[in-house]
Image (cartoon, coloured by chain):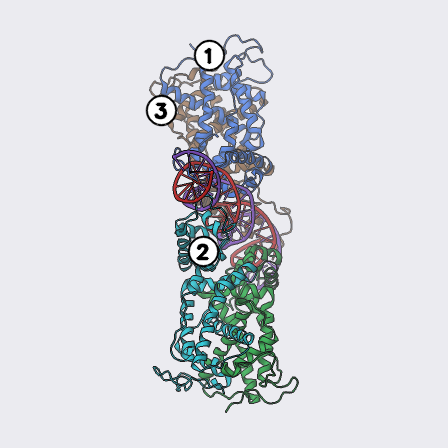
Chain colours: A blue, B brown, C green, D cyan, E purple, F red
Amino acid sequence: MVAGMQSRSTPSARAGGRPRSAAADHAILEATRAALVDLGWTKLTLGDVATRAGVAKTTLYRRWAGKSELVVDAVAELFDELELPDSGSLATDIEGVVLRFAALLGRPETKTALMAVVAESTTDAPLRERVRASIVERQKRLVLEGRQRAQVRGELPVEPDPAAAARTADLVFDVIAGAVVHRALVSAEPVDTEWARRFTALLLSGLAATAGTGPAGPDLSRPPAGSPTRPPVQPH
Amino acid sequence: MVAGMQSRSTPSARAGGRPRSAAADHAILEATRAALVDLGWTKLTLGDVATRAGVAKTTLYRRWAGKSELVVDAVAELFDELELPDSGSLATDIEGVVLRFAALLGRPETKTALMAVVAESTTDAPLRERVRASIVERQKRLVLEGRQRAQVRGELPVEPDPAAAARTADLVFDVIAGAVVHRALVSAEPVDTEWARRFTALLLSGLAATAGTGPAGPDLSRPPAGSPTRPPVQPH
Amino acid sequence: MVAGMQSRSTPSARAGGRPRSAAADHAILEATRAALVDLGWTKLTLGDVATRAGVAKTTLYRRWAGKSELVVDAVAELFDELELPDSGSLATDIEGVVLRFAALLGRPETKTALMAVVAESTTDAPLRERVRASIVERQKRLVLEGRQRAQVRGELPVEPDPAAAARTADLVFDVIAGAVVHRALVSAEPVDTEWARRFTALLLSGLAATAGTGPAGPDLSRPPAGSPTRPPVQPH
Amino acid sequence: MVAGMQSRSTPSARAGGRPRSAAADHAILEATRAALVDLGWTKLTLGDVATRAGVAKTTLYRRWAGKSELVVDAVAELFDELELPDSGSLATDIEGVVLRFAALLGRPETKTALMAVVAESTTDAPLRERVRASIVERQKRLVLEGRQRAQVRGELPVEPDPAAAARTADLVFDVIAGAVVHRALVSAEPVDTEWARRFTALLLSGLAATAGTGPAGPDLSRPPAGSPTRPPVQPH
DNA sequence: CGATAAACGAGACGGTACGTCGTGTCTTGAG
DNA sequence: CTCAAGACACGACGTACCGTCTCGTTTATCG
């Protein structure tokens, strides 16, 4: 389970009654994802999810406050499957995670659900917190891991101030996640290898340096495939 | 009017009977924004909009296909008010537009509507096209204008290949818009001057160069306030 | 239609909208009676009635406040079909109407509905008034008609005081209707010709005179069949 | 306890485990009556009764098959409290019992429950039998007792044929009970002393003799208060 | 005395119906 | 042909009870 559901009064208090079915939780989240694929966010109904899961509607409402909460939990499980590839350089690591993230956003259940729950969360503070805890914060691990790996490789300097390091991680996370989400869902254009390369180059070298980079020319900032040689970015 | 609504049978077709009330269009879009502020996307109903606008529901359906289309038109008008400030340098221009964009996203009607219509558009191709045409493509003008201005100032080189130039503009647009939207609506954290500066520095100079940039230290890449002097980015 | 339904704001006010379907009213009441036959009062649901009538649930709720009100109207139509036979003597008139009333109470839709709405009406004053207006008061015509006919025949004296006459009519109505209902629905025993005769004899002659009257002996208070001769009750 | 509840497998069967709480039975029936007063038949729920009685729902279902059975038992206890007053004459005895019966029907728990269980019983044979055994048959004792008392007094002749006597008792019972129930619950008008007198006069003397009897004139069929003299009805 | 067995409280469970609400269409009469 | 008004068919909502079940606990009688 990704995050807490409707909390029991006390976690350790002996309930004194029939315990909640553990199997139902899994069946419901599975059914929710299937319904998202078949129907999309708008046409998904809790009644339909209950039927698919072989569960009564009341069981569903006993555990989740509504459609948004349920869907957040259902898709959060998918986000937890994201991994940062170790491809030998920061640039290719970024490209890899961008493509994986884009692939995740390309799945119908994620595509239709993510923006919808974010939209809901703008007018629902508890939901906003749930989205943040279940999805956003959990994926920052990818940025942290990537940076550490790059620092070990010597591709990035070590930031001594932890607060500044955290600020930068947040910024980088918003930039990467934001760019991919915007490209994929708002602009609705493909996030392919080509785009991932150009985005990574911009992120690493900045706007000025990137100018003129295109698909035709050789990209000197990336190591030849298979040869993990010099890092493209030289701190100091 | 931002974009085409439900098209009349033929623009030049015989006038026939009573002409459509022009005042109604404006009243409806205004009422839509007011309803978004009061109720948010989910609780907004077309019946309520019609009542607020002093119009019958049929009048509304005669002109828009549904809630999403109506809201796209209603918020697109707001996006058209965005402007690129001319502050003397590319960096401060970007910072300025980032803050203006964030202010727009902070308005309740925009906040709740933008992600919602994007979510809808993931499973509705005509709506996706409408969002692209009415909102996304129209705002790329800001990137194009900013680049041209920077080129005039000598802050950015001129890209000779028009296709590559367009690709870069699209990329930069997704990065800027995506980062701001993600920060404001997904991470749900404030887009303030401080964040705008750090984001701009990252965008212009890249990840390596930005490392270590914090609120305390002087940012050499930015000109002293009020003195539009040397550009912060030196091509070549 | 038996009684007023959910009243329009003003009967003479031009509504200014689509008028209510007159056909729907009839279809709904018909469907209600059919559902009573098939399901009985308790299992009857408004959703089912709506389906049977080919009508939306909202249409039903727009016109009736609830299940009780609907059923009152549906069965009231049946009660209006009751008639007082003109058989030549007061005794046989009463026997006839008792048997007809019993037959009506034997129909499944009436049997299950009548006591149920009366039960509801004990805790619902508006419903009580509706039952009284739609069913109870309307059937008193039978008593009034029977008395007048008997007075014409000379079987009953004319009561000069209208108030006393009304009081007596109410009393007789409660005795006749109450006895038949109690026999048929509470005691749950058959109301057959035999019972009708004995009841009529009791009503006309009183308890003392009736004592000893049984199925075997000839009933001198009744004229021979087919011969409308002397009235069984002699005023003065 | 009025009537059998859900029967144990066998009364003589091995005691086995924990015996049923005797206190629970009483608490449940008491709670049922209280709930009838507060909520009425329709809004009464078994869950609520269980809560009021401080008992689990399962305990309740272990003993009664459903709401109707429970309520029959709960109100049957009240009907058993009815008594036939010994006032010295048949007429005043009847008037007395009519008023007591009316007072019982005026209690909120009885009023709302009696018609409801009768309504249920029209489509539920076992319930019908339970109503008959627990309520209807038990109250016929009042008629039998009244008749016997009248016969001792010489107000009524002795019927030699037991079958005919039983038929008459049933008829009289339906007439009295039916009239009072109809007046009180269907017509929803008060059963006061005045009405009880006029009803008794009609029952004893028949329709013709009753004509003209009103509140103003002296009622010769009743003995002066306090003087148990001549019977009002003279059998031959 | 300990074992056995049923009753008990608590409350989750699969169902079913509720009465309301929003959607998008329709049917009126007025303009 | 448009418009305001509002009825209409449809379908989902979230809630309430139903009657059953599954727990852990209690309270008897029996061996």
Q: Which of D227 and C129 lies nearest the eye of the viewer? A: D227
Classed neighbour count for the residue bearing mark 2: other residues with Cα under 10 Å, few (<14), some (14–19), many (≥20): some
Question: Furthest-right residue in view?
Answer: C226
Task: Name the residue carrying label 1.
Answer: A155
Classed neighbour count for the residue bearing mark 3: other residues with Cα under 10 Å, few (<14), some (14–19), many (≥20): few
Label 1: element kind = loop
Q: Which of D193 and D147 lies nearest the eye of the viewer? A: D147
User: Subunit of mark 2?
Assistant: D
From this view, report whether residue D226 is shown above or below residue D138.
below
- Is residue D55 visible in the rendered image? The answer is yes
Residue at x 55%, y 28% (from the top left corner): A105
Distance from label 1 to label 2 (Cα)? Answer: 74 Å
Coordinates of residue A78 in the picture (x, y in percent) = 53, 28
User: Subunit of mark 3?
Assistant: B
Task: Name the residue carrying label 2.
Answer: D44
Q: Nearer the viewer, mark 1 or mark 3?
A: 1
Residue B226 has which mark? 3
Amino acid tagged 2: Leu
Amino acid tagged 3: Gly
- Is residue B47 visible in the rendered image? The answer is no
Coordinates of residue C159 in the picture (x, y in percent) = 48, 87
Quarter of the image with the C terminus of chain A is top left
- Which quadrant of the view contains residue A33? top right
Amino acid tagged 1: Glu
Q: Which of C13 and A149 lies nearest the eye of the viewer? A: A149
